[in-house]
Image (cartoon, helix red, strand yellow):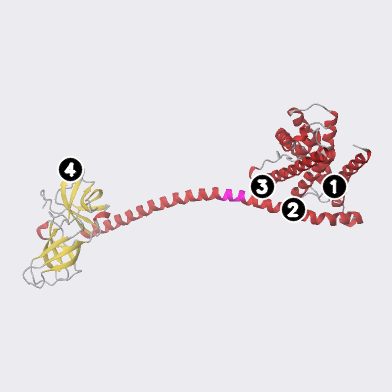
Amino acid sequence: MHRRVEGMHGARASIIMVFVVFAMLLTQSAFSRVLAPYPFSPYLGLPFVLALGTAPGVRILRGATTAFAIGYLYDVFTANPLGLHTFVFVVGYLAAWLVGYLLTFRGIAFEVILTFVLTVLLGGLLELIRGFTPGGMSWNGVSMMIALFASAFATAFVAPILFALVRWIDPASARSTT
Amino acid sequence: MNYFQTIRDATILLALVVIPAAFLRANLRDPSELSWLDGALLQASGPVQYVAEWAADGVTSVIEDYVYLVDVKSDNDHLRGENDRLRREMRILRGEAGRIHELESLLGLRERLATETITARVIANSISPSFRVVRVALDQGEHGGVRAGMPVVANQGLVGQIRRVSDRFADVLLTIDPESRVDVVVGETRARGRLEGLGERNRYRCRIQFDRADDRVAVGDEVFTSGLGKKFPASILIGYLTKIENQELGLQQDGEVTPSVDFTRLDEVLILTSGPKDTDAP
């Protein structure tokens, strides 16, 4: 019974997180025209996925489902082939879960470094898959690296705030599983 | 967690990776090479993606429109400020154009009068309690050759004569002042008379007393200086006859004259210097 109540709380927190990411994506897509931060455009949804992956209190199934939903939102918003971000975000979640399982080290530095490294790797994976898209964008190597690292830097910069936001939305993510 | 739950979770987890990978594979493949599974996946994903994109586009366009409106407001403020500035400049230019027109008219008047003149600018209007001009000061004085008694004319007609002169300034005795006396002729009959200011506070009027009671004059006749007494050159317009009194009695004929000059709007005037230079004003 207690486990079922906890599951409902978790599901509600995940739904709220998806809506928060949805709102952030809307805001980012609307204001990017005005602010024009390229290439420093953060992947605002990714820290949510990584925070869930490294949170000891979140069940892997719920975390992966949430990552799936957030990735799907990205696919819709970025007009990419359906499944691209969904796939990469679920993979990213699993990678973060593995890191969180192997390492006990936590804190702001961990969040920043983890976000930076995984954003670069997952961004690289995205570009690699995009390379197979018929008629897809052909990147210049240097400009792709600049875009990848600048985006990772911007994402890592805001990561501690978004990790804290995840803990605030889902207090269970701060607790260890029993 | 029992064995069954572990298997279930692992299966769902695998599905969460495989399903997007399958969608992705179907989307990335050449449409001519699609298998039946790829086709089914695309068929399934199409409507979902359409609805999701429609919702996202709707919300995004609302926000973008708002951002656009913020830009419009800022543009609006900028244009409003520019509009105000241009209106101010237009008012100034209109004023300048009016002044130039007045100066051109004065130039024409100077040529018509064929006398030596000094152009002077009105620097002060003394306003009575009922907002009527009763005295005018000019920016020319003795240094400029101005003397008391010199006639002052504007484009519309006679203003008056110089009453007092200092080094750099001069006061004008207006035709409407009770102290003012001007010999005049009226209308086509050239009826002679003597014009005095009424000095009324609420209106600009002069009184005319005709020399002969049987002179035929009518309301609306023009009143000019006669040139008698050599105080004023002849044929300078003073105003229009607006009222005739005692015409039927045959003893003495009087009337009222409305000056042609609008004393409240005087800006530039001419002082006629070649006429008589009396030292005492009438």
> Which tag is nearer the camera, tag 1 or tag 3?
1
- The N terminus of chain B is located in which quarter? top right
| Spot occupied by residue B84 in the image (x, y as percentages of width and height) | 45, 50
Callout 3 touching callout 4 (CB < 8 Å): no
Counting from the top left corner in percent of width and height, residue B217 is at 15, 71
Q: Dot 3 corresponds to which residue?
A: A30
Labels 1 and 4 within one chain:
yes
- Which-is-in-front pick, marks 1 and 4? 1
Q: Which residues are magenta?
A: B66-72
Q: What residue did someone put label 1 on?
A: B20
**Disc 2: host chain:** B
- Please name the amino acid that badge 2 sits on: Glu
Distance between the Cα atoms at labels 1 and 3?
27 Å
Q: Tag 1: Cα neighbours inside 10 Å, few (<14), some, or many (≥20)?
A: many
Q: Looking at the image, is mark 3 or mark 4 nearer the viewer?
A: 3
- Tag of residue B166: 4
Number of numbered discs present?
A: 4
Tell me which chain the residue with mark 4 is part of: B
Where residue B38 sits: x, y (%)?
89, 54
Q: Nearer the viewer, mark 4 or mark 2?
A: 2
Query: Tag 1, which secondary structure?
Result: helix
